[in-house]
Amino acid sequence: MLANFIKTLAATENPVPVIGPAFAEVAKKYHIGLLKSVFFVAPSFSTRKGEDREDILFSSGTPTEQTPSYSETYYTGEKGVATFQMYRWLGEPEFTEKEKEELKAYADTLLVVFGRFRMINAIKQIGHTDQLTGLPNTGGFLTHIDKIIAKGEITKYNAFYFNLARFSLVNKRFGTKETDTIIYRYANEVAAFFQEGECLGRLGGDNFVAIVKKERTQEFLQLISGVKTYGMLNSRAVPIIISAVAGITEITGEIPHCGTLIEDCGMALNMAKYVTKQPYAFSSVDMKQRFYEERQYVSRFYEAVENKEFKAYYQPKVNIDDYSIVGAEALVRWEREGKLVPPGDFIPVFEHNGMICALDFYVLEQVCSDIRRWLDMGIMPGRISVNLSRKHLSNPNLAEEIMQVLGKYEMESRYLEIELTETVNEEETEQLITFMNKMKVNKIAMSIDDFGTGYSSLNLLRSFPVEVLKIDKSFLDVLDKNNRIILSHIIRMADELGMSVVAEGVEHMHQLECLKEMNCKVVQGSLFDGPMPREFFEEKMQKGKYSIE
Ligand code: C2E
Ligand code: MG
Ligand code: MG
């Protein structure tokens, strides 16, 4: 009988449905009316909430004793306790020692069979579980969403993709090991918010996903805007507040695939992080369109370089006294499928994807090659400035690479100027100063672009006077009292520090007159010309100056 029992249970992966029928014969022999299992497992990594359950495995329907007539308790490998209880028919005598010994063999069998069953489940579960936090991983999260979709309840929820803000600083400060523990603590704090049906998952690193009931969206955003936890540093608990940036998708109807849900949220997250620079953003149709375009830009980049679709356009810089052309700024354009794409559309995308450095060098080569051509034609181009993204500053060989390009076209450095916008942090400022020193040695002029709109202007000038300040167009747009005061002082300060000033975005005569009064020497703007292709600029240079009534 025992052999049969073992054989039946061993033949199936999930023993629960077959235990009842398999035990019936045993129950009849020993006059047992009820077989129960009781599981208690403390909360742990594999079972976040722990377990405390009682199941009826077999019931004959016959009235039984109130207390178990035979019970066997085992300690399980997961720091849990499993008990199997057998209740005899009402009024039956107690089991003899011999009977108990026989029944123990059945209980032992049940333990082994359940152990195997729980192990199989645990393995399946681990495949869907993030090893660090015990939260669902991508697979686990998507499985959960699938279940909610199957229930027809998905529109009750909003989906979130969130990323911990400035988390690399935490990593730097506490080290990888402690940072892992911080993520674990953080996950626990956030997980405590979740209710039945909702789900928090970790995709890896500091990226989390969630679905939360719609009406709890604001509450959830509030929670993740600053989670208090701590990190251990030299055996001391240092309190930290972790804030997250989130992309949210409001689920309003059918979703084609649950993967697209994560993708939509990811798009919104990027929007919040890089474009609006807000703690969160909701995904929208516009955003999807934009994201799609961005992806197209990125995937088309190398092909576009190959096809020479990027063109340096030139915007003349004009001497304010005699309107002679003293140089130009090279501004990139993308001639794409017969259309001219302005840099504002693709430069932020390439900055984000790291392609900007390749693009800037491509433009630099074109400019050097054009200058070589002009010099060979006997045209004196003055000084041509090229914009470099600040992304270059982390390249320690930047100056050497620029000099290599100049060498390739046998070009003197006095024809080139490098424009960089103001830096935003100390580390970058240091890199900028190192770079500027090298440029100085190589006699290449440097200008600070969009001067007055960044953070470090004066500090930078104190540490290193550059050749040119390019005053941002915004100061000229509204020539009110305050802007006039600022403008005239920048111009005077630059003059006294031995720098020159180029005023950008001069569109109207009254702006020009105002700048003249302030003693500004060089201007650039549509009042004279906007950026133009090389051939047109060649013609302008041959004329040499503008005439304006
Ligand atoms: P920026 O370097 O400050 O360039 C000046 C921008 O003002 C140019 O816009 C120019 O066309 C525009 N502009 C000039 N005069 C006027 C005017 O009178 N009125 C108005 N409304 N605008 C005027 P553009 O060409 O669209 O370039 C935008 C920005 O893209 C540039 O600002 C620069 O930061 C960036 N950029 C352009 N080419 C490159 C490049 O090759 N590499 C890098 N890294 N950035 C570039
Ligand atoms: Mg510029
Ligand atoms: Mg500018």
Image (cartoon, grey):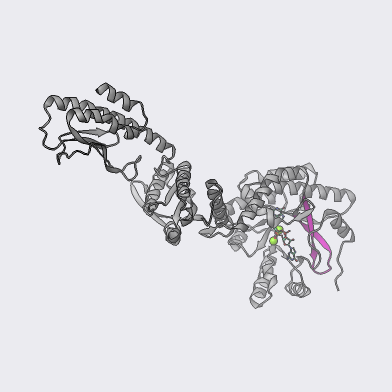
Please tell me whether residue 350 is drawn above or below residue 96 in the rendered image: below
Residue 321 drawn at (x, y percent)? 81, 69
Residue 169 drawn at (x, y percent)? 47, 50
Left or right position of 99 against 186: left
Tell me the quarter of the picture where residue 340 sits: bottom right
| Quarter in which the N terminus is drawn | top left
Q: Is residue 15 magenta?
A: no
Left or right position of 191 against 70: right
For the point 49% across and 55% down, which residue is it? 155
Please tell me whether residue 217 is drawn above or below residue 34 in the rendered image: below
Left or right position of 446 against 94: right
Q: Is residue 323 magenta?
A: yes
For the point 65% across and 63% down, which residue is it? 451
Residue 81 drawn at (x, y percent)? 24, 37
Which segment did they paint magenta?
Answer: 310-331
For the point 41% across and 39% down, which residue is it? 131
Please tell me whether residue 216 is drawn above or below residue 95 in the rendered image: below
> In terms of secondary structure, what is the magenta stretch mainly?
strand
Name the foreground residue: 388 vs 11: 11
